[in-house]
Amino acid sequence: MTLRLLLGDQLNSLHSWFNQTDDEVIYVLMEVRQETDYTTHHIQKIIGFFGAMRQFAAQLKDNNHRVHYIALDATENQHSFEQNLLGLFKQYQIKKFEYLWPDEHRLDQQLSNFCKSIEIPYEVYDTEHFLTTRTELKTFFEGKKQWVMEYFYRYMRKKFQILVTQDVPEGNQWNFDKNNRNKWKGNPPIPKPFHPDSNAIEAIHQLILNSGIKTVGNFDPNNFLYPLSRLQAQEQLTYFCEHLLPYFGDYQDAMHTEEVNLFHSRISFALNTKMLHPLEIIHAVITSYRSDRTRVSLSQVEGFVRQILGWREYMRGMYWAHMPEYKQKNTLQNTHPLPKFYWSGATRMHCLKTSINNTLDNAYAHHIQRLMVTGNFALLAQVDPDEVDQWYLGVYADAIEWVQLPNTRGMSQWADGGIVATKPYISAAAYINKMSNYCTKCYYDPKKRIGKNACPFNSLYWNFLEEKKKHFINNNRMTMMLRLLEKIPQTERDEIKTRAQAIITNPDAF
């Protein structure tokens, strides 16, 4: 008898394991406190994972596979993978143990060490999900000083022949990023978001409450937007292609007080749990584009493909190339605590209030809210990247460490010293004002650097450049901003520093 372990982010029904049934193979899925408690997760994140795991187990059973499912409140549940597995080894007299490569370093190490301790044979298999191996990115950049994503993205386009003909990019241009920076002002209209049928989620919600698991965020069963099965995920993808793709690229960086989703696909949860395969998503989007080029332009499609084919695989490669040391990197030596308002949304800064409340209500915020609002403030306030990591890992339903860590510690917080991003993604209020309507209803003035109602982003931005300039003095991409800093009169720079220090010391007062 063989026991095969499936983790909560390994719900790939297309995996070759499931091509045939075998009464001598048992699949096990577990809801364990080990996974709910290693950080404080959003309530919707746990509901989403448990709901998807349960539906996946049911699908396996319907396809005549043997499944042992350990629910959160099961009497047999020891709430650790090792102890539950040892119990199953004994119960079923297991002769061989098999599992899929975990995508998080901690679980990879945990299961590797576990296998060294058991007396039965074991075997590890690929998840058959990603488009690159763990080491492919590192090999691609061997000998290169800077691992630039754009070059890797072009390599991936050629490798999979995506929007290329004889290695020439469609439209004679690899990247349409400059087309992806429009501010949304109410038009074109945004369709209502796709709502999957999720009748089972209230029972899971109650189970989590009864268990005493510490969570963050809110839950409304009528506003739950995460697919719990491959069929629902496919329906969500179809909805995106039909209703949102025509404007995705143009407005992918836009933010608005009245809209949470805008034209974003919201498929990251389904993708990161492996209910959908990246290539089927890419081909669905390209098929939609080719079927009606008057409705969907190349720039909309390329902007989306770049996120899946380029950035996602690039981040995974970065994770495995630099772990476990990457998780301890803090180049800028930031040590301040994360403001309490990140857990409540209680701040007068309208951009942060809106983005954080979106997060608390939906376990979701799109990439610019994460990068240029919540991440930008945390970096300018010089927050300890350990605390920033824990927040991002917990509050978003799609957050799994392999994708969260390099995005947060690398791109957002520049704690890696430029491994992921050549310069820190920071801005004063002008960028937020340009890409959103957040500043129009804010207590603070986005054009002021000093004074009681000056936007905190402004004083924090110039103070950050002042305090951290030794890290950027030789960075060509930071030269212009450092020159502008030097042009600010010393008296104003002193006032900026005083106000910035007040914000850093007590950010929850602002």
Image: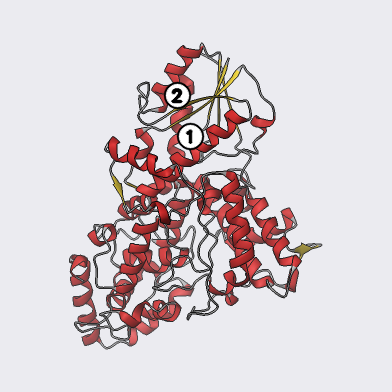
The 10 Å Cα crowd at callout 2, few under 14, some 14 to 19, many 20 or more, is some
- State which quarter of the image contains the C terminus: bottom left
Q: Nearer the viewer, residue 328 or 14?
A: 14
Question: Residue 128, can we see it?
Answer: yes
- State which quarter of the image contains the N terminus: top right
Q: Quadrant of residue 98?
A: top right
Check disc 2 and report the residue beneath it: 114
Picture colour scheme: secondary structure
Q: Nearer the viewer, residue 503 or 43?
A: 43
Q: What kind of residue is marked 1?
A: Asp
CB-based contact (under 8 Å), mark 1 and mark 2:
no
Give the number of the disc on residue 108. Answer: 1
Q: Nearer the viewer, residue 29 or 482?
A: 29
Task: Name the secondary structure under disc 1.
Answer: helix
Q: Quadrant of residue 507?
A: bottom left
Q: Is residue 262 left or right of residue 12?
A: left
Of callouts 1 and 2, the N-terminal one: 1
Give the number of the disc on residue 69. Answer: none
Q: Residue 368: x percent and y percent? A: 45, 67
Question: How many numbered marks appear?
Answer: 2
Q: Residue 290: x percent and y percent? A: 75, 66
